[in-house]
Image (cartoon, helix red, strand yellow):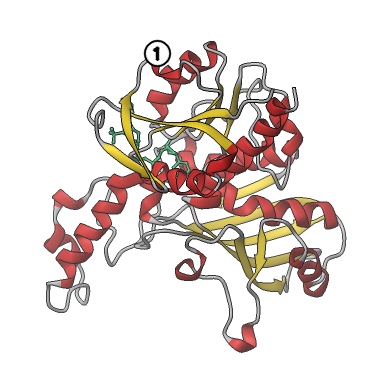
């Protein structure tokens, strides 16, 4: 194929869509037309892709005519309806919603773990994992190859933007409101009294000056959808169907950047020094681990970075063959847009070489 491929960003007006536009602009020469798509509410608006100003089109079947690869950045139920429409037109879809991820006929791809999976896509659809899982995978894939991952226990500290533009705006609004108040948070009930019921959406409780131990919807036996995603999607991407996973997902008042405290157990003996050597060379991982110099991963330093940051590496005291560490990943970059761009790059090379 000699022509350049045409690419669409579906959900171009969202928070992930905004990062997608920036990343596509950075590799603009690789693509022919770039088409921006969102709901009818946004049709006619102009958004930038680098120097270009492109008109947003409403989501219809016809809007996929002539498109080769489409990045879907839509709510689950909208993806569920429209991904098959685009795929039926021969478009290769890379979908970031949760809807197709566990479908056995849809590969769930992270370049650092299973890049070859992109080529086997019987439905024409490739799924992008959730942002919490994607922050972990580059580190886990490298450690698994070196030491054999057996189990992990994860506690997450997830940013408001994981809930899209609605979540981000809600956090900023709440911060503005509590910043104006005196001594807020010093007495029980202060934050609730100030913010009241109006600020329960979209997190289920106020997020300013608070942490909320519920991310996603409730599932059986007290688990949340996000906690089950960390387990199921990690198993699928790493090709470890028996990986033992315990996960607690928590929303914190951070704008961008998901953090996770991880306890991981391995088949083989592991030391901090050996793990550091592995991670220093691991693709997609930035080792940020110099405790004596006060260097460790934090969301304020991880935002906008391509690599996920890993540090606070410690040998577990009471568990054999185990490590403790802290991971920070930009949920909008590797957790969403960047991973999708990397997957598209693999597909583009495949299609261009046909
Ligand atoms: N945020 C993250 O950290 C993150 C990480 C990984 C995966 N994801 C996934 O990525 C997807 C997008 O998330 P986001 O955070 O970017 O959400 P968002 O900020 O709420 O943006 C949603 C986008 O979907 C469009 N949309 C909504 N309803 C539509 C409809 N009926 N028809 C056409 N377009 C519609 C919106 O267009 P309008 O502006 O026109 O309404 C907007 O462009 C979701 O599936 C999410 O789970 C998000």
Q: Work out whether residue 185 can be spotted.
A: yes
Q: Which residue is located at x 50 percent, y 57 percent?
A: 330
Q: Position of residue 58 (x, y in %)?
A: 31, 23
* 59 left or right of 316 in image: left
> Quadrant where the C terminus lies?
top right
Position above or below: 197 against 68: below
Write down which quadrant ligand 1 falls in.
top left
Quarter where residue 74 is shown: top left
Q: Is mark 1 within 8 Å of ligand 1?
A: no
Q: Which residue is located at x 63 percent, y 24 percent?
A: 106
* 280 left or right of 341 in image: right
Front-most of 105 and 37? 37
> Quadrant where the N terminus lies?
top right
Q: Work out whether residue 223 can be spotted.
A: no
Q: Position of residue 49 (x, y in %)?
A: 41, 44
Mark 1: secondary structure = helix
Residue on which the image places disc 1: 62
Q: Position of residue 228 (x, y in %)?
A: 54, 40
Front-most of 24 and 247? 24
């Amino acid at each position: 194929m000699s022509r350049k491929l045409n690419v669409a960003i579906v959900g171009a007006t969202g928070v992930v869509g905004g990062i997608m536009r920036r990343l596509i602009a950075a590799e603009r020469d690789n693509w022919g037309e770039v088409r921006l798509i969102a709901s009818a509410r946004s049709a006619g608006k102009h958004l930038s892709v680098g120097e270009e100003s492109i008109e947003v089109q409403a989501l219809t079947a016809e809007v996929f005519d002539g498109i080769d690869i489409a990045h879907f950045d839509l709510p689950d139920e909208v993806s569920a309806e429209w991904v098959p429409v685009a795929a039926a037109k021969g478009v290769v879809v890379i979908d970031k919603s949760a809807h197709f991820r566990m479908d056995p006929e849809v590969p769930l791809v992270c370049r650092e773990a299973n890049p070859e999976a992109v080529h086997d896509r019987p439905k024409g659809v490739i799924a992008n994992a959730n942002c919490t899982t994607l922050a972990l995978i580059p580190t886990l894939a490298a450690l698994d190859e070196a030491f054999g991952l057996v189990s992990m226990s994860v506690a997450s500290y997830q940013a408001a933007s994981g809930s899209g533009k609605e979540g981000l705006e809600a956090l900023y609004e709440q911060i503005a409101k509590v910043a104006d108040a005196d001594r807020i948070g010093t007495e029980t009930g202060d934050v609730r009294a100030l913010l009241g019921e109006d600020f329960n959406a979209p997190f289920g409780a106020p997020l300013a000056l608070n942490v909320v131990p519920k991310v996603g919807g409730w599932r059986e036996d007290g688990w949340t959808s996000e906690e089950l995603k960390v387990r199921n999607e990690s198993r699928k991407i790493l090709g470890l169907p028996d990986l033992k996973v315990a996960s607690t997902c928590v929303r914190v008042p951070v704008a961008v950047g998901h953090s996770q405290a991880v306890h991981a157990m391995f088949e083989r003996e592991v030391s901090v020094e050996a793990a550091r050597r592995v991670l220093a060379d691991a693709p997609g991982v930035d080792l940020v681990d110099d405790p004596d110099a006060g260097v460790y991963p934090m969301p304020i330093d991880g935002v906008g970075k391509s690599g996920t940051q890993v540090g606070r590496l410690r040998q577990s005291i009471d568990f054999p063959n185990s490590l403790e560490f802290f991971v920070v990943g930009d949920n909008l970059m590797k957790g969403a847009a960047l991973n999708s761009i990397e997957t598209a790059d693999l597909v583009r090379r495949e299609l261009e070489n046909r």
